[in-house]
Image (cartoon, rainbow, N blue to C red):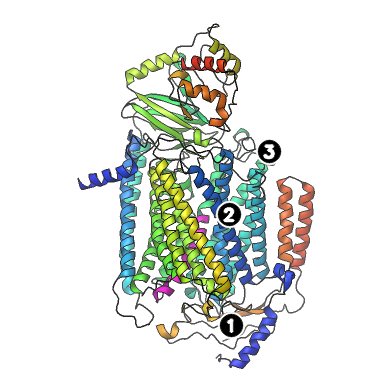
């Protein structure tokens, strides 16, 4: 039986662990850190920066579309802007943002000292950054991707798009895909192995369920788009004919491969965000989530069905009615787990005692936006109706209610919620409430009228539209709404900047929340936990007050693991202690490997084999160094019990 | 009666048919009509769901509660979960209903039993539409562009082709979208219930001028339609004295064709009987002399990126060729 430690012993432990776990200072440490919290914050900041870039692109488009027949942007500029807006938001903002939350929070939520593969974690970030830069450096040169984020062939084949634009897209997406895949593998192994003893799978926070589900899906989905992009790159540069009709290829093959990836990806962008709500909303309702098991099962089943609906993006391609009907039915079925989630959130508020702090506003707002995005999805699931809706502004409305309503609102709510944990300081509550209302009003003003525009037939992806079709008034309202929404985002930035300078100190648990991350100081020390916690319920910090069982979690156990950079490995389902893992220290290998890969992809872009070879040799040498076994301290110690 | 007025109210919000020529909830053909009914039904369900959730959420947030004792927890989940089961059950029934209604609509759109009264081959080009009217008598076949004239009440089969990239053929008030895909021939069916001009639009992003790739379906009564067809078959006569025609043959004929003249270009739209068309440049401008004269010299201003260069002709040549083309009724 573990006994609580005396305070002075604990203070000495802290100093000892700090020395073991702390990242080296200075520039070296900045590049070499493998601390999941620093990597998580980097993910959050980088993704937010891309959100701002994508937002500016959107505002430029909204100026152009505010009235009929405006000529502020050339068609070419508009096409690059809307393509980069989609690529930025979907690839460079939405998933990396959630990865940021999960990177920072997972080990803290799970009671571990780090992710399973800290260097892989760093690699995943550096590749993401390099791929983002790779996609963006072409913008000032006027060669940014211009075929939409969906990049349909043959419009993106060499004869119709001879510039570098599409090669930037294909190679950039393959490059970024490496980051996603290694990140996903890391999350999966982390949840299977790096938990506190007693954190069995029925005690995982829903955010962990969401990210686990999304990561598993990514392992299956991302290869499809990487393959498609590689085939297109070959078609464009080496005359293969995967998609070229003249050589016996099939343009529709691209659409199948792209949407086999694309639809599960959309769920990967919302399930972790829904997890944020499922974990954080109950804190402000002063009760546990209603229907934990239902929500966890809904999360997983949404993703399973999500792999069988991709053809609903292709209802107008002339496929046989029978197969369309199958995918239409599957698209209706996927609404059921979503409905369960919505009812669980409402029941949590209903039976709880809501406290109207700013995060609550974002989460409650999310529930409504989720339903609006859900029912517009229900309408597009109907194959016959979709023949009219598809490729109109109705779909633009739908995807923005999904991706802003279900991703951005939970994310901004999550920032308000976890900012104290990230930084040790509170955000300003009054400004937070203003941020919510400005964003909420701006969002609905910008995106609700798009439903109507779609129903009166405005096609999407047009750089202008004629007068006399009834579009002008709605578009003006939409543009005004977009700028109001942007003001809300600015308010958030102001709040963050002010709080970083002079925010109130947060303390370990400002919201009186139940999960493990709130048991450690804010911001958490490099080693996360002085001693490995031993978990007995889903709400370790609420156990005494909920009094659901007699068992109690032990947060100050005597499992110290202070003889090296070590954390505990547990069995996959029941979280029995299994082994002690020695974790790697600071390393420059991840950043070097990412740079080597950048050289390879840059060489492939300009088809320069010298550059590709130099980069490939660099990558090979780095990998050799990476896989060289560590000589000392690598032996796994015997499993401990109890 | 109540439902009718609700529909009328929403119709007002969505604009009347005059103000919104692409509004498919105001159908003018059987396929669009089957879908519009489904559309109104699903909109009603969706709106009801949003309102119910808004109500539940508002009540859940604002309902009266006993004074706060600072305690945690809301009791057992069991009762709440029973309500969640009821809500999910009701949702499932509506989803099932919507799925069945959808399948019925798909069947009524795709299961056409009557043979088509007319077959048109439509080819999508960057960024205009070519239409070839089929006939059992090869001498009665002809090619035109950007305007499809069809007889009222007759089901018309449209065979869809593409000469370059993927486009999508859409006449919202008559039928849903069908893509034109290179290497594949898709089919769709349009039928107009009454005379009128129905705007169509490319709806698959197809490059620089996707925004200016409209077309028009002109529905005439069958008698007028037959007259129109006969008229289309009449060739323009070569007239060396017609200055405009000479300019056309000199400057335009490499890309454009006019039946009866040596002009046989196939890169751009066939301009036979151009004077009777609705618009210039696939919806870029309404068709009149003034616009045509402007278009000829400022193509790249009106439709930047289109394959037609701004010709920069002397004013008298512009005037002559404009008069010639507008005269081709």
Residue picked out by circle 3: A239
Q: Please tell me in which quadrant of the rendered image residue B77 appears.
A: bottom left
Percent coordinates x, y for residue B50 in the rendering: 34, 57
Say which chain tag 1 marks. Answer: A
Percent coordinates x, y for residue A365 in the rendering: 41, 63
For the residues bearing labels 3 and 1, Cβ distance under 8 angstroms: no
User: In whole angstroms, how far apart are the C-alphas of marks 3 and 2?
Assistant: 35 Å
Sequence order check: which comes first, mark 3 or mark 1? 3
Residue at the image position 40 percent from the left and 57 percent from the top: A335
Image mark count? 3
Left or right for A349, reference A528? left
Say which chain tag 2 marks. Answer: A
Q: Please tell me in which quadrant of the rendered image residue B9 appears.
A: top left
Percent coordinates x, y for residue A29 in the rendering: 72, 71
Say which chain tag 3 marks. Answer: A
Residue picked out by circle 2: A53
User: In whole angstroms, how far apart are the C-alphas of marks 1 and 2?
Assistant: 41 Å
Q: Could you say which disc has been placed on residue A567 in the image?
A: none
């Amino acid at each position: 039986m573990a006994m609580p430690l005396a305070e002075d012993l604990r203070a000495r432990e802290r100093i000892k662990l700090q020395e073991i776990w702390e990242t080296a200072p200075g520039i070296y440490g900045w590049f070499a850190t493998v601390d999941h919290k620093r990597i998580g914050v980097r993910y959050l900041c980088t993704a937010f920066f891309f959100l701002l870039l994508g937002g500016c692109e959107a505002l430029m488009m909204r100026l152009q579309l505010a009235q009929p027949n405006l000529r502020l942007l050339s068609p070419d500029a508009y096409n690059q802007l809307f393509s980069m807006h989609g690529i930025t938001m979907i690839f460079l903002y939405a998933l990396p943002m959630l990865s940021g939350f999960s990177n920072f929070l997972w080990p803290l939520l799970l009671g571990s000292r780090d992710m399973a593969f800290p260097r892989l974690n760093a690699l995943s970030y550096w590749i993401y950054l390099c791929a983002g830069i790779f996609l963006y450096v072409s913008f000032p040169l006027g060669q940014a991707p211009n075929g939409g984020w969906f990049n349909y062939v043959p419009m993106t084949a060499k004869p119709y798009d001879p510039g570098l634009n599409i090669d930037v897209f294909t190679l950039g997406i393959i490059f970024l895909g490496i980051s996603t895949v290694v990140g996903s593998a890391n999350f999966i192994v982390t949840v299977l192995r790096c938990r506190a003893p007693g954190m069995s799978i029925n005690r995982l926070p829903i955010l962990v369920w969401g990210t686990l589900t999304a990561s598993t899906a990514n392992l299956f989905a991302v290869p499809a788009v990487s393959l498609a992009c590689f085939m297109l790159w070959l078609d464009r540069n080496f005359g293969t004919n995967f998609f070229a009709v003249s050589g016996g290829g099939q343009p529709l093959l691209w659409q199948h491969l792209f949407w086999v990836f694309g639809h599960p990806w959309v769920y990967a962008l919302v399930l972790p965000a829904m997890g944020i709500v499922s974990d954080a909303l109950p804190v402000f309702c002063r009760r546990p989530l209603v229907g934990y098991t239902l929500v966890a099962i809904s999360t997983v089943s949404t993703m399973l069905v999500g792999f069988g609906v991709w053809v609903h993006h292709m209802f107008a391609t002339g496929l046989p009615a029978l197969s369309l009907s199958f995918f239409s039915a599957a698209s209706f079925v996927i609404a059921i787990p979503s409905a369960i989630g919505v009812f669980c959130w409402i029941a949590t508020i209903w039976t709880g005692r809501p406290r109207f702090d700013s995060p609550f506003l974002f989460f409650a707002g999310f529930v409504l936006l989720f339903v609006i995005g859900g029912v517009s999805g229900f309408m597009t699931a109907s194959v016959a109706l979709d023949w009219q809706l598809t490729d109109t502004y109705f779909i633009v409305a739908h995807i923005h209610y999904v991706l802003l309503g279900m991703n951005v609102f939970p994310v901004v709510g999550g920032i308000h919620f976890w900012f104290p944990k990230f930084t040790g300081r509170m955000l300003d509550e009054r400004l937070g409430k203003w941020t919510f209302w400005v964003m909420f009003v701006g969002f609905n003003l910008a995106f609700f009228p798009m439903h109507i525009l779609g129903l009166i037939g405005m096609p999407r992806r047009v750089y202008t539209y004629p007068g006399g079709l009834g579009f002008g008034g709605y578009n003006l309202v939409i543009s005004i709404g977009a700028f109001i929404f942007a003001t809300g985002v600015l308010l958030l930035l102001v709040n963050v900047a002010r709080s970083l300078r002079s925010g109130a100190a947060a303390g370990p648990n400002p919201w009186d929340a139940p999960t493990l991350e709130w048991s450690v100081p804010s911001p958490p020390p490099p080693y996360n936990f002085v001693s490995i916690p031993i978990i007995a319920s889903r709400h370790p910090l609420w156990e005494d007050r909920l009094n659901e069982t007699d068992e109690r979690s032990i947060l100050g156990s005597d499992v110290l693991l202070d003889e090296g950079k070590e954390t505990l490995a547990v069995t996959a389902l029941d979280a029995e202690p299994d082994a002690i893992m020695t974790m790697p220290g600071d390393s420059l290998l991840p950043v070097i490997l990412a740079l080597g890969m950048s050289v390879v992809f840059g060489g492939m872009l300009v088809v320069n084999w010298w550059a590709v070879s130099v980069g490939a040799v660099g990558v090979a040498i780095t990998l050799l160094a990476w896989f060289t076994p560590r000589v000392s301290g690598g032996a796994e110690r015997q499993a401990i019990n109890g | 009666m109540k439902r009718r007025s609700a529909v009328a109210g929403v119709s007002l919000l969505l604009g009347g048919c005059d103000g919104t020529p692409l509004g498919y909830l105001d159908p003018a053909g059987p396929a669009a009509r089957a879908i519009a009914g489904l559309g109104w039904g699903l909109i009603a369900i969706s709106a009801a769901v949003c309102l119910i959730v808004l109500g539940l959420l508002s009540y859940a947030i604002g309902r009266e509660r006993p004074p706060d004792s600072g305690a945690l927890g809301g009791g057992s989940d069991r009762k709440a979960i029973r309500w969640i089961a009821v809500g999910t059950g009701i949702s499932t029934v509506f989803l099932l209903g919507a799925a069945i209604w959808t399948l019925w609509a798909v069947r009524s759109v795709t299961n056409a039993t009557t043979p088509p009264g007319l077959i048109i081959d439509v080819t999508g080009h960057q960024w205009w539409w070519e239409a070839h009217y089929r006939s059992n008598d090869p001498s009665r076949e002809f090619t035109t562009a950007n305007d499809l004239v069809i007889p009222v009440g007759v089901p018309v089969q449209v065979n869809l082709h593409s000469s370059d990239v993927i486009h999508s053929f859409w006449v919202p008030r008559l039928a849903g979208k069908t893509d034109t895909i290179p290497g594949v021939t898709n089919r769709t069916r349009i039928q107009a219930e009454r005379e009128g001009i129905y705007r169509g639009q490319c709806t698959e992003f197809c490059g620089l001028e996707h925004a200016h790739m409209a077309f028009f379906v002109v529905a005439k009564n069958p008698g007028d339609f037959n007259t129109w067809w006969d008229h289309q078959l009449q060739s323009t006569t070569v007239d060396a004295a017609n200055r405009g025609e000479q300019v056309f043959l000199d400057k335009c004929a490499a890309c454009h064709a006019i039946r009866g003249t040596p002009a046989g270009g196939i890169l751009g739209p066939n301009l036979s009987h151009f004077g009777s068309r609705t618009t210039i440049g696939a919806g870029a401008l309404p068709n009149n002399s003034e616009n045509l004269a402007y278009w000829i010299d400022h193509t790249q201003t009106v439709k930047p990126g289109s394959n037609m260069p701004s010709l920069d002709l002397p004013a008298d040549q512009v005037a002559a060729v404009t008069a010639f083309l507008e005269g081709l009724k």
